[in-house]
């Protein structure tokens, strides 16, 4: 006959549920980097911010449950531009007209560098995040979507970094904890926009399906 | 002892290989519709073309092996605008500067209606395509990504229809052969841009992964 649960049983059950809940909700942060990235010739540059990158990636981050979306640029005029766009949709008339857009753009934080974003995450999570860079090229050390999906389920915070222009500058790729494999389609063509790539990658890592 | 293959054996083998190849390459066409769609209040409208929709969805279509990308609008000024954008990247300086962009935008064909796109596909494939509409809402008759992926593997041509603005007008949804289930993330938020949704859906239907 089953005995009545003791306080300890209930506590263990609650702890178990908390652990289960924590491990089943990945703590993934996203960064879109405008410096240091490379141009078509391979020179390191600071790229301009694209308005629709902010909208599309914040909406995808909100859909798939990413915690924050860092827009990384050290350029003062670009930071002012991003603040203006966010403000229109969160405090301005845009927020009243389209509340769904507001709740996505509220995820955006502007940072000077990837390191600054990682430090903010450390402040929130009390542990420094692992960094994952995305790249259209494959590396011998690349990890698969399935591997990263499993790693994220373990609950440690991760910062997923996207590069604009022709991609992140090489030193920043090799410094990361993980390099994610490129997206593969039915063809050898691998020129997705960063907006499309971010949506697809978040879906592969966090999406649910029947 | 194995006998030498006869002509008939070789012919059967070739036929088998051809059937296998045909059934393993889905014949999927994509359409982005600007009319008839609904606005925020539910009125049926014709929406304006967004430049980056053309770029992002053609690049995703090219990556995942869709056959053509139909931009559907009956408005003359909008058709001229789309032609101008395509021409810049296929015949103009854009095509020289960025050949990868050219090979994506070459997939675009402008049509007045979804029916016109379907008729062109019938001319190419010698069979009228099945139509699949995408929608952020779930219907009792919605089919899953897995089901549609399996159907596509059978080789019959399909036209996958995306709506702009607040989505396709209701009569066009119920007239379709299939309604695809909405994209599900970790949250109840379902406000992806049509650019992101198209990339994610093409990946779920045609993408390959380890």
Image (cartoon, coloured by chain):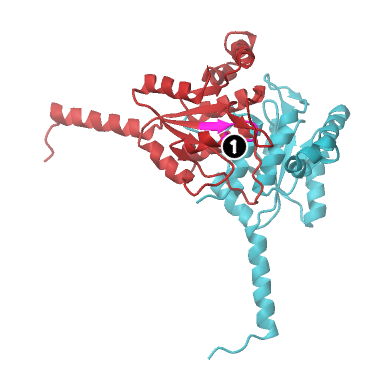
Chain colours: A red, B cyan
Q: In the image shown, does B74 or A23 lie closer to the viewer?
A: A23
Say whether residue B199 is magenta. Answer: no
- Could you tell me what secondary structure mostly forms the magenta stretch? loop
| Spot occupied by residue B80 in the image (x, y as percentages of width and height) | 87, 31
Return the residue at label 1. Answer: A197
Q: Residue at x 70, y 84 (%)?
A: B7
In depth, the one of B154 and A19 nearer the eye is: A19
Query: Going 80% across and 40% down the picture, which residue do you hit?
Result: B95
Q: Badge 1: how crowded within 10 Å, few (<14), some, or many (20+)?
A: many
Q: Secondary structure at mark 1?
A: helix
The quadrant in which the N terminus of chain A is found is top left
Q: Is residue B190 visible?
A: no
Relative image position of residue A83 (x, y in whole percent): 59, 13
Q: Nearer the viewer, residue A64 or A97?
A: A64
Left or right of B33: which side holds A208? left
- Report the chain holding disc 1: A
User: Residue at horizontal 67%, vertical 49%?
Assistant: B65
- Residue range in magenta is A161-169
Question: What percent of the width, then of the height, locates residue B110?
Answer: 82, 38
């Amino acid at each position: 006959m089953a005995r009545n649960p003791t306080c300890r049983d209930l506590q263990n059950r609650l702890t178990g549920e908390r652990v289960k809940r924590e491990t089943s909700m990945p703590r993934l942060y996203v960064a879109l980097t405008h410096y240091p990235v490379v141009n078509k010739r391979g020179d390191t540059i600071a790229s301009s911010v694209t308005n629709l990158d902010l909208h599309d990636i914040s909406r995808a981050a909100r859909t798939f449950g990413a915690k924050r979306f860092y827009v990384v640029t050290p350029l003062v005029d670009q930071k002012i531009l991003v603040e203006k766009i966010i403000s229109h949709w969160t405090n301005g008339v845009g927020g009243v007209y389209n509340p769904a857009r507001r709740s996505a753009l509220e995820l955006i934080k502007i940072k000077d560098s990837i390191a600054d974003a990682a430090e903010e995450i450390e402040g929130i999570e009390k542990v420094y995040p692992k960094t994952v860079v995305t790249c259209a090229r494959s590396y011998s050390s690349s990890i698969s979507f399935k591997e990263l999906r499993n790693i994220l389920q373990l609950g440690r915070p991760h910062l997923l970094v996207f590069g604009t222009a022709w991609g992140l500058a090489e030193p920043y790729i090799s410094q990361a904890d993980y390099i994610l494999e490129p997206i593969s389609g039915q063809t050898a063509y691998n020129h997705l926009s960063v907006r499309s790539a971010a949506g697809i990658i978040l879906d592969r890592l966090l999406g649910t399906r029947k």
